[in-house]
Amino acid sequence: MRYKAEIHVTLKRTVNDPQGLAIRGGLHSLGYEGVEAVRAGKYIEVWLEAESAEEAERLADEMSDRLLANPVIEDYEVVVGEAPSVTS
């Protein structure tokens, strides 16, 4: 079956986030003074073939640990769902 893994990568709470601070500063300068904090991250989509959703999630988790995220400073969340077939 074909699956789509959505992977959200964010810095761990204990890691300084200069990009988030810059975004917060920009929002404040635009008048959004109520914004208290911003944490920036990345969103990755991976389409893959696997025998089950559990296997697709295991593979996406493994990919995240090995390449897509830096487990020392980043956390990640994997959400897997069936992906529609591509037809031309």
Image (cartoon, rainbow, N blue to C red):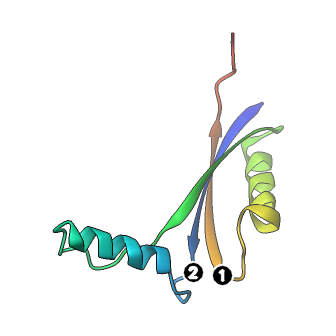
Query: Considering depth in this image, is 27 or 39 the residue closer to the camera?
Result: 27
Query: For the view shown, which residue lies furthest in the top direction?
Result: 88
x 57%, y 76%: residue? 11
Which residue corresponds to mark 2?
A: 12
Crowding near pointer 1: few (<14 within 10 Å), some, many (20+)?
Answer: few
Quarter of the image for residue 82 reads top right
Task: Name which quarter of the figure residue 21 lies in.
Answer: bottom left
The quadrant in which the N terminus is found is: top right
The residue type indicated by label 1 comes to Ile
56 above or below 88? below
Q: Is residue 36 above or below residue 40?
A: below
State the CA–CA distance, disc 1 to disc 2: 6 Å
| Quarter of the C terminus within the rendering | top right
Residue at image position (37%, 70%) is: 23
- Where 15 sits versus 85, above or below? below
Question: Quick one: 1 or 62, which is closer to the camera?
Answer: 62
Q: Nearer the viewer, residue 45 or 61?
A: 45
**Mark 1 — residue?**
73
User: Quick one: SS at disc 1?
Assistant: loop
Q: Nearer the viewer, residue 47 or 26?
A: 26
Q: Give the residue displayed 72% in from the left and 43% down from the top.
A: 53
Q: Position of residue 3 (x, y in %)?
A: 71, 37
The answer to whether 3 appears left or right of 31 in the picture is: right
Query: Label 2 neighbourhood size at 10 Å, few (<14), some (14-19), many (20+)?
Result: some
- For the residue marked with disc 2, what is the amino acid? Lys
**Extreme residue in the bottom direction:** 14
Q: Position of residue 38 (x, y in %)?
A: 38, 73
User: How far across and how far down the image is residue 31, in percent?
Assistant: 16, 68
CB under 8 Å between discs 1 and 2 = yes
Q: Earlier in the sequence, mark 1 or mark 2?
A: 2
Element carrying mark 2: loop
